[in-house]
Image (cartoon, rainbow, N blue to C red):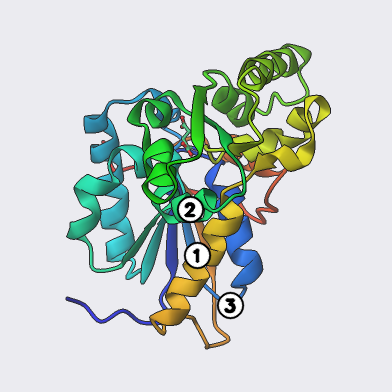
Amino acid sequence: MNILKSDAPIGFFDSGVGGLTVLNKVKKIMPNESFIFYGDTLHVPYGDKTKEQLLEYSKNILKFFEQKGCKAVVMACNTTSSVIYDDIKIYYDFKLYPVVQSVGKILSQLPIKRLGVFATKATINSGAYEKEVNKYNKDIKVFGQYCPSWVRIVENDLTKDLGSIAIIEKDLQKMLTNNPEKIVLGCTHYPYLLNILSVFAPKDMFIDPAVPFAQYIKDDLTQNNLINNSSCHFEEFYVSSAPEKFKQAAKMFYNLKQNPKLLTFYT
Ligand code: DGL
């Protein structure tokens, strides 16, 4: 077992720009940390992939973070957290934070009886949100719904397109027939759509799990004496394809000062 260093970087990964919504929240409350972000844009969308494919992609990315000496890796992606976390969690020395499992307890404490979850097909089919919330509170009924077009809308920067807005409204209306009191945006890409969603339903109905997730990570690093106290820190960004496109789609959530570097594990 390697000793983890408090001044080592924190790795983040997701299928694309979505993970930046999580990085943003973490950076806000832990500004002294170094971050390495990997967006697997070659394989987006993850939500349609098989477990075997998700395992293969994630293992390559985690190996990269291992080589970079990360003290922790944030599985910002709801899909990989839901589908493969249990299969890989024992293999790494660094702290591994999966979003769904990290926020389940916090969601279970909401004073509500009906909780909607918007997520990818793979996340919904895994039943992970329901399982995590009901593990702590069986009185909350969870309504999962997947939104097949939302990741594409975000990755392709189509949030102003009228056709996209109509799709989002239709998906939301379907969810609202369940009368949810709150709706979790259970895919890192979906907070990019909050302004559109809140035209059709109250903004405070939507929960971005990245907010409690960031606090969970900070609390855990603090408890383990792994907060960076040195004044040195850096940020690196990598994608597996189309760096320019990533930068364009990211601009709503993150001010990327330079193009991310292209890095693939496939020849
Ligand atoms: N953003 C990821 C998630 O949180 C995956 C979206 C996708 O690539 O389908 O689930």
Q: Residue at x 53, y 49 (%)?
A: 107
Label 3 or label 2, whichever lies nearer to me, is 2
Q: Nearer the viewer, residue 77 or 142?
A: 142
Mark 3, residue position = 32
Q: CA distance from mark 3 to mark 2?
A: 23 Å
Residue type, numbered disc 3: Asn
Other-residue count near label 3 (Cα within 10 Å), few / some / many at <14 / 14–19 / ≥20: some
Residue 62 in the image: x percent, y percent?
A: 30, 54
In which quadrant of the rendered image does the C terminus lie? top left
Residue 219 in the image, given as x and y percentages of width and height? 49, 73
* 128 relative position to 76: left or right: left
Residue type (three-letter) at the residue carrying disc 2: Val
Q: Residue at x 45, y 50 (%)?
A: 104
> Looking at this view, is 162 or 114 the one in front?
114
Vertical relation: 33 (above or below) 184: below
**Chain-order first, disc 3 or disc 1:** 3
Q: Residue at x 57, y 58 (%)?
A: 212
Tag shown at residue 103: 2
Residue type at mark 1: give it. Answer: Tyr
Q: Is residue 38 visible?
A: no
- Residue 78 image point, x, y percent: 44, 41
In the orientation shown, which residue stands out farthest toward the bottom? 230
Q: CA distance from mark 2 to mark 1?
A: 8 Å
Q: Mark 2: few, some, or many residues within 10 Å (few <14, many ≥20)?
A: many
Assess whether mark 1 and mark 2 are in contact (beta carbons under 8 angstroms): yes
Residue identified by numbered label 1 = 216
